[in-house]
Image (cartoon, rainbow, N blue to C red):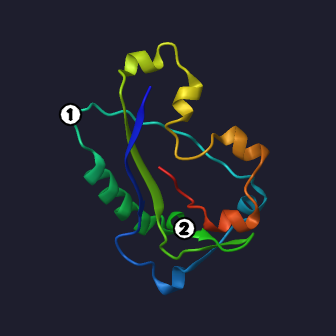
Amino acid sequence: MEIKVTCSEIIKPSKPTSPENKTHNLSIFDVFQRNFYFPVILFYPTFTNPNNNLTHSLSEALNIFYPLAGRRNDLVSVSCNDEGALYNEATVNTTISDFLNPPNLESLNKLLPCEPHHKIIHSPPKEEESKSLPHLMI
């Protein structure tokens, strides 16, 4: 199976975050929560090009969910600095039925923008590393 990444870019909010929302303080639940990564893979027919719609919609959504476009400031807050979310798109030279019948999780993991959650939970990024990671990777 050959995977070709066709798009990998940082999508920023379409409007800057207002000054009063530049720092988002985390709740006590967020502070003590471990890193979570929920992998989702979306499949599209080859004749469509969802990229423009998805990137535009993501840019608009980041205006409302502005902490997702920021970076971790410290253990208790997020700097809502509009650095953006990571957006990836790829093509695969196989059919979806070949790919999923039977499902091969290792092959599916190759389509994710970062390591699967079980690897992140067992060795979470250091505090300094987590400050540079996007909160949202698509």
Which mark lies nearer to you, 2 or 1? 1
Question: Residue lying farthest top?
Answer: 102
The percent position of residue 132, horizontal first and vertical second, equals 61, 67
Task: Point out the image quarter for the N terminus.
Answer: top left
The answer to which of 105 and 73 lies nearer the viewer is: 105
The percent position of residue 82, horizontal first and vertical second, equals 47, 73
Position of 91 relative to 70 (above/below): above
* Residue occupying image coordinates x 39% and y 16%: 97
Tag of residue 47: 1
Position of 87 relative to 11 (above/below): above
State how far apart marks 2 and 1 are (Cα).
34 Å
Question: Residue lying farthest bottom?
Answer: 19
The percent position of residue 61, horizontal first and vertical second, equals 39, 61
* Residue occupying image coordinates x 71% and y 41%: 119
Q: In which quarter of the image is residue 18?
A: bottom left
The disc, 2 or 1, on the residue closer to the chain's N-terminal end is 1
User: Is there CB contact under 8 Å for labels 2 and 1?
Assistant: no
Position of 114 relative to 81 (above/below): above
Tag of residue 8: none
The total number of labels drawn is 2
Q: Is residue 136 left or right of residue 2?
A: right
Q: In this view, does 41 lie to the left or right of 7?
A: right
Secondary element at image label 1: loop
The answer to which of 56 and 47 lies nearer the viewer is: 47
* Residue occupying image coordinates x 53% and y 27%: 107
- What amino acid is at disc 2? Pro
Question: Residue lying farthest front?
Answer: 2
The percent position of residue 85, horizontal first and vertical second, equals 47, 60
Q: In which quarter of the image is residue 12?
A: bottom left
Secondary element at image label 2: helix
- What amino acid is at disc 1? Phe
Where is mark 2, residue-wise? 67
